[in-house]
Structures are given as structure tokens and as C-alpha cells.
Amino acid sequence: MQFTLSDEQLMLQALVERFLKDRYPPGKRASYRAAPSGYSSSNWAQLADLGVFAAPFPAEHGGLGAGPMESIVVMEALGRGLAAEPVLEQIVLPGRLILHSGSAAQRRRWLPQIMAGERHLSVAHIEQAESFDLTHVNAVVQSGAAGMQISGEKTMVPGSGGADEFIVSAREPGRADDPDAIGFYLVRADAPGVEARPFRLVDGSVACQLSLHGASVTEKLDCDFRAFAQAVDDARIAACAEMIGIMSVLLEATLDYVRNRKQFGAALGSFQVIQHRLADLYVLLEQSRSHLYRAVLSAHKPHGGAAAVAGMKSYISAAAVQMGEQCIHLHGGMGTTDELAIGHCHKRLLVLATMFGDADSELQRFTRLSA
């Protein structure tokens, strides 16, 4: 099957690429990452003005009404530019969660603010658990005289830099093994009882460890765990699209390097063993793209959609890490320096490859869903 972008999709791709070309001259990304939030607030506002945040949301909620293909076009372009802005963490995941599970009033209130870049939401769900089990939630919500309050610990909240509120998962007491007992609640970042300890991930982005000690809930999302799982699958697709953009940059940079770098009086690219390795990397990239397209076309089908997403995430996570390692190796010692984008690309791939499940855990999930 031949996949070609439509004129509208090409225009959207060119819009994002032009923004990245203007705002990301060589060396500028490091200064954006050095900010306390891990990204540039002016870049964030400009992306919102360009309509990038509104692209994946329906027109009835103020979005541009673009489909899933347009969403991956945007994420792949952001990956190619190695953008520091947490579009995946603060737009895709919380936005899709509210879209899938929020009440009509919540969608009317929150989605326009998210698309305008005015509110920064981060999803606080990950706890100390094995095998990326999304049903592992020990945080507890209880009702009292002061309303609903949450107590618990979230080990890693991605994209938490500059967050105004957290969407926190918590379990009703006495229902330890029931996924239907898991709810999702909005908690202000500055609320009493909220303690956020920020740290940097390997790619320089800001995450935090979140401790909640009777933190007050501002409101509860009209959400069940199935809606959350669907939003996470949307985020997995977006993460894989970003990885494919980064993988494309890695391959292009490595091809350029071996064509110009000489060893023993000849270009590295003239050696057959190097050509074979690059051919293998090209196959990895194109097979990853095929997995992405298959998952996008299957994601919201009643049967097989979740399995296709799991298979995609497993394959692309492994392929992306392998490509990063191989491209660094082909560059030699230069590949590990901060002056080249190769190392920065690989670090971002390491984060995305383990976000919402690594290659092994997603392969196990694919096996369960396909049985």
C-alpha cells in the first residue's frame, strides 16, 4: 500500500518545519533545555498561535479537526527538529484523556485552554511498579469534610516543568485489585499537601516525583480506566511518530558523515561492511514507519486496535534504541559529544522508548491482546 501525504498534510508539515528552522538554530536547543521548565515559553506560545496544539482535536471543541494522520505528521516533524517543547506530555496525553473521558462541561472548559497553550497539565500516574503495569495504582482518594483528598506517591511525572495542575490517578479504598476503582482527579500544583521534587531525565526534559499528603481535589474527570488506556494508546502512537522523526535525522546525519569521513584514503561509506550496516538501519526505519501507519489505521477499531499499538510500540522502541547506538558507533567518539545532534537524538529516543512501556513489556502486552 502506498502512503503519500495530501496537500493539506504537506502544508502542516511545512508549517512545523519552518517554525523549527526559525527557532532552533545550531546550539539553541541547549539554552531552551536549561530553562527551569526545560523548554522555551515563547516557543510554546508560538506553537499555540500556529495551531499546532489544536490540530488533533475536533472542530466542535475549537480544534482544527485533523485526523490521526495529521497528528503523526506534526509529531514526526517535531521529532525531526528535536523540539524541546513537551507536546507529547502536556498536549497529547492530558488533552486526549480529557477528550475521551471528560464531561461535556470539562471538555468545554479545558480543551480550549490546552489548545491555546494557556494551561499546562501533566498526568501523574506512574508509580513504583514492575513491567509498566498501568493498573498498579496505590495512591488513595478519600472523601471527607473538606472534600476529596488524595494521598500517595507518583514516582515519575513526565513533562511536569511549568505544570499548573496534575491529573492524578488514585484508587478508591478497599478495592485494591479492581481497575474500575481507579479514578482521575485534577489537583493544583500549588495546593497544600502537594510536594513536587523536579529532576532531569536523560534527554534534559523536566520530570518530577510527586508526593501527595491529603491534597485536595479540584474536580474529578468523568473517566474510567478504559478511557485512560485509550488515551495512553494515542500517546504511544504520538511517541512513536516522534521517534521516527528522530530516527530519520540520525540516518541522514550518519549517511552524510560516512560519505565525507575518510579512513585509509577512502570515504567510510565506500566500505561494503558500512554499506550493509546502513542498509539495515534503513530497513529498521521503514519497517518502523509501516508499524506506525498500521497502528494509526487500527487504533480505534473494536478488535485488534490495542494489539496493533502494542506491537508498534514494541518494535519501534527496540528499533529506535538500536539505531541510536549504531549511529553513534558509526560516528566514533564524535557521536558522544554535545556538539553533534547524534547524542541528543539518542537520549530523547531512550526516554520515548520507555515511555508508556518499553519494548519487552509492550511485546508481552501484544501477546496477551493477540491471544
Image (spheres, grey):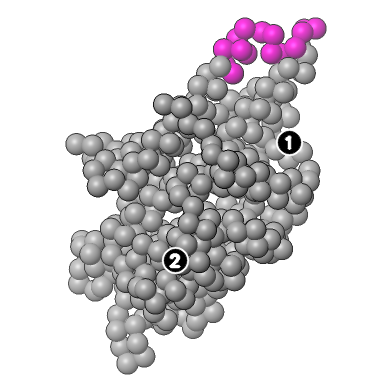
Vertical position of residue 299 compared to residue 51: above or below: above
* Residue 210 coordinates in the image, percent (x, y): 48, 68
Total number of numbered discs in the rendering? 2
* Foreground tag (2 vs 1): 2
* Residue 162, disc: none
Q: Could you say which quadrant of the image residue 276 lies in? A: top right
Residue 123: x and y in percent read 45, 63
Up/down of 93 relative to 148, above or below: above
Specify the quadrant of the image occupied by residue 368: top left
Residue name at image x 59 percent, y 38 percent: 246
Spot the residue most to the bottom.
145
Type of the residue with mark 1: Leu
Q: Looking at the image, can residue 155 be seen?
A: no
Q: Is mark 1 on a helix, strand or loop?
A: loop
Q: Give the range drawn in magenta.
A: 264-278
- Label 2 sits on residue: 60
Residue 105 is a magenta residue:
no
Q: Position of residue 220 (x, y in %)?
A: 35, 76
**Who comes first in sequence, dot 2 or dot 1?**
2
> 348 or 255, which is in the foreground?
255
Side (left or right) of 285 relative to 223: right
Q: What residue type is labelled 2?
A: Glu
The residue indicated by pointer 1 is 340
Q: Residue at x 67, y 22 (%)?
A: 255
Decide: few, some or many residues near mark 2? Use Cα within 10 Å; few <14, some 14-19, many ≥20: few
Residue 140, placed above or below residue 304:
below
* CA–CA distance in space, label 2 to label 1: 44 Å
* Residue 35 on image: x %, y %: 70, 61
Asked if residue 273 lies in the magenta stretch, the reply is yes
Q: Which residue appears at 35% of the width and 36% of the height?
A: 311
Horizontal side of 297 relative to 44 (left or right) equals left
Q: Can residue 313 be seen in this view?
A: yes
